[in-house]
Amino acid sequence: MSDENIRVLIVDDEPLALRGLKIRLQEFPEIEIIGECANGREAVRDIKAKNPDLVFLDIQMPGLDGFGVVRAMIGGPAPLFVFVTAYDKYAIDAFEANALDYIVKPVEEERLKDAIHRAREAIKSKAATSRESQLVELLASLSDDDRDRIKELINDPDWAEKQRYAERLSFKDGSKVVVLTADEIEWIDAAGDYMCIHAGGKTHIIRETMKALQQRLDPARFQRVHRSAIVNVKKVKELHPHSNGEYFLILENGGELKLSRSYKDVVARFL
């Protein structure tokens, strides 16, 4: 990079957050924004192609999340990373992943100034050149599943064109953050402007649309069975036909859901 400019890539799956951070960064004359990415897959591609000095990286993204992006840099030149997160709990994980810094949303001007100052000093002191060796240490902490998943995403020549689905859902529930694996989820139903996620005998209420959730979940495992319900097909124990053309789904936990006639083509998923 030049003595004056820090070449920056911004990564966030929320368009408003991406735009807001870009506007704030444009206020710093030394910052040169060289790209914007809406997911982890695009981030890996652009980091390798554009070689930024600094990446502002959202942690929570469907498919390949922020930590996955960092891990994907193992074995090649790695930029400095500043993690951007909605939840403070990720700060510890961020530093374990050798991030330069982390910022909690909504981004405050002073925290952004601090992060840019850290980046400037790290680059001047050549600290960035040692980051690859630190990132390599992450490899030892990866599970086999994590390693295989990242390898699949990076080595697949068509990975940029394929949609990947969330293996985990993270959301705020009061003062805590709940993390559910996709396999834990039994079914999801709508309650006004909120969604009720049923898992392990508990119901978690989040503010998100049915459409948005459906886009994040793998259709091979999660099927819409009613205009206001999605079910994990692995959790369905029995399928009972009704005389009016509808079906009743009996779940492993004893729960019962109606499969409306509008979604009768889904029946084949349970046979």
Image (spheres, rainbow, N blue to C red):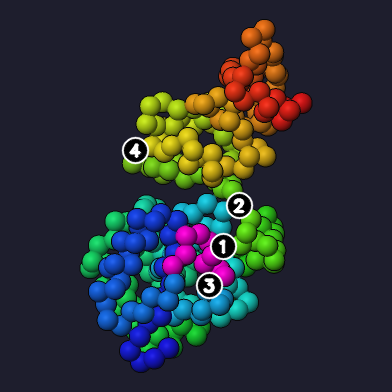
For the residue pair 2 and 141, the one nearer the viewer reads as 2
Mark closest to the chain's N terminus, 1 or 2: 1
Q: Secondary structure at mark 1?
A: helix
* Distance from Cα at disc 4 to Cα at disc 1: 31 Å
Find residue 54 and report its image quarter.
Answer: bottom left
Magenta stretch encompasses residue 44 = yes
Are there few (<14), some (14-19), or many (20+) residues within 10 Å of tag 3? some
* Distance from Cα at disc 2 to Cα at disc 4: 29 Å
Disc 1 target residue = 41
Residue 142: tell me if it is visible: no
* Distance from Cα at disc 2 to Cα at disc 3: 18 Å
Are there few (<14), some (14-19), or many (20+) residues within 10 Å of tag 2? some
Compared to 85, does 125 lie above or below?
A: below
Disc 3 target residue = 46
Mark closest to the chain's N terminus, 3 or 1: 1
Nearer the camera: disc 2 or disc 4: 2
Q: Secondary structure at mark 3?
A: helix
Disc 2 target residue = 164
Compared to 167, does 45 lie above or below?
A: below
Mark number for residue 174?
A: 4
As drawn, the residue found furthest toward the right would be 271
Q: Secondary structure at mark 2?
A: loop
Position in image of residue 88 (x %, y %):
36, 54
Residue extent of the magenta highlight: 36-45
| Type of amino acid under label 3 | Asp
| Type of amino acid under label 4 | Gly
